[in-house]
Amino acid sequence: MTRLTTCPDAETVAQRAVTHVLRAVERARAERGVAHVALSGGTTPARTYELLNEDSGELTEMEVWFADERCVPPEDDESNYKLAAETLLARDAIETDKVHRMEGERGPAQGAERYASLLRERLGEGTGAPVLDLVVLGIGPDGHVASLFPGSSTLDAGDDAICLGVRDSPKPPPERITLSLAVLKAARGCLLIASGAGKADAVNAMLGEPSRHVPASLLLRERLTVIVDDAAAPDGPIA
């Protein structure tokens, strides 16, 4: 069952998200000596990263990954890596060799291939998908997560898919790199955060019946934590 928390406003969402991330990192560190956390872009996650930066001393044994990236250089304003660099990573508390960015400037095919190889090298467990400790996700108004969009062929990638190139994103820029649905499902936990009335319909749909038209609804419910503000809170039952 999905764990859902509603908060009065976006700032409280970010604060609760920070608590969840720190607990996940502490648990992973205690059990395995290191925490592997994947980040997403977006306004709501950005505030969470800013607050996490204030507690960056607690993240020294964390390795940073990314759920998706636009095919732009790392210094581009569209880059998810740049967002993380200016927020969570601003104090350099996490060593640079523990930050694994998607090389969007290489394009969707080569960038995805190189990232999949790195994930296999660092996190491969047999023939299954690499297992991240936590994936931090936002949600689009259309219900997309990472760069997995409604009805996209990326949703049909098999369980052996790790990282996928996207050439036809309905949101600019069209070329992107994304973790596969299989990797999101294999993660020990996914944290989805949303705020604002513009996300309410997507959150409602996500918590309803699973559908390819709402990629967020395909996440593994028993490993999913959702934190939203009152404006984005669902008005119906959780499926």
Image (tube, grey):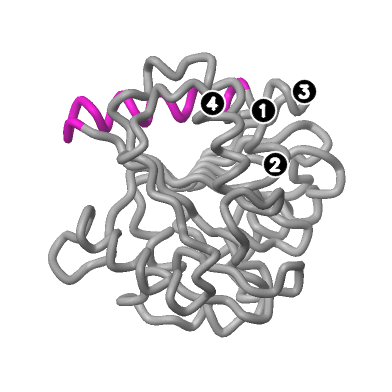
Q: Which mark is residue 194?
A: 2
Answer above or below: position of 76 versus 20: below
Choose mark 3 or mark 1, whichever is in front: 1
Q: Amino acid at mark 2?
A: Ala
* Label located before the other in sequence (2 or 1): 1
Answer above or below: position of 237 versus 12: below
* Label located before the other in sequence (3 or 2): 3
Tell me where the magenta segment starts and ends, as one range: 15-33
Categorize mark 3 by other alpha carbons within 10 Å: few (<14), some (14-19), many (20+).
Answer: few
Measure how far apart labels 1 and 4 are at the Cα level: 21 Å
Measure how far apart labels 3 and 4 are at the Cα level: 28 Å
Measure how far apart labels 3 and 1 are at the Cα level: 8 Å
* Label located before the other in sequence (2 or 4): 4
Q: Which mark is residue 130?
A: none
Q: Residue at x 47, y 79 (%)?
A: 109
- Chief SS of the magenta region: helix
Q: Is 178 placed left or right of 212 in the picture?
A: left
Residue bearing mark 1: 13
Q: Which mark is residue 8?
A: 3
Residue bearing mark 4: 90
Choose mark 3 or mark 4, whichever is in front: 4
**Marks 2 and 1 in Cβ contact (< 8 Å):** yes
Q: Position of residue 221 (x, y in %)?
A: 48, 53
Q: Position of residue 68 (x, y in %)?
A: 53, 59
Q: Amino acid at mark 4?
A: Ala
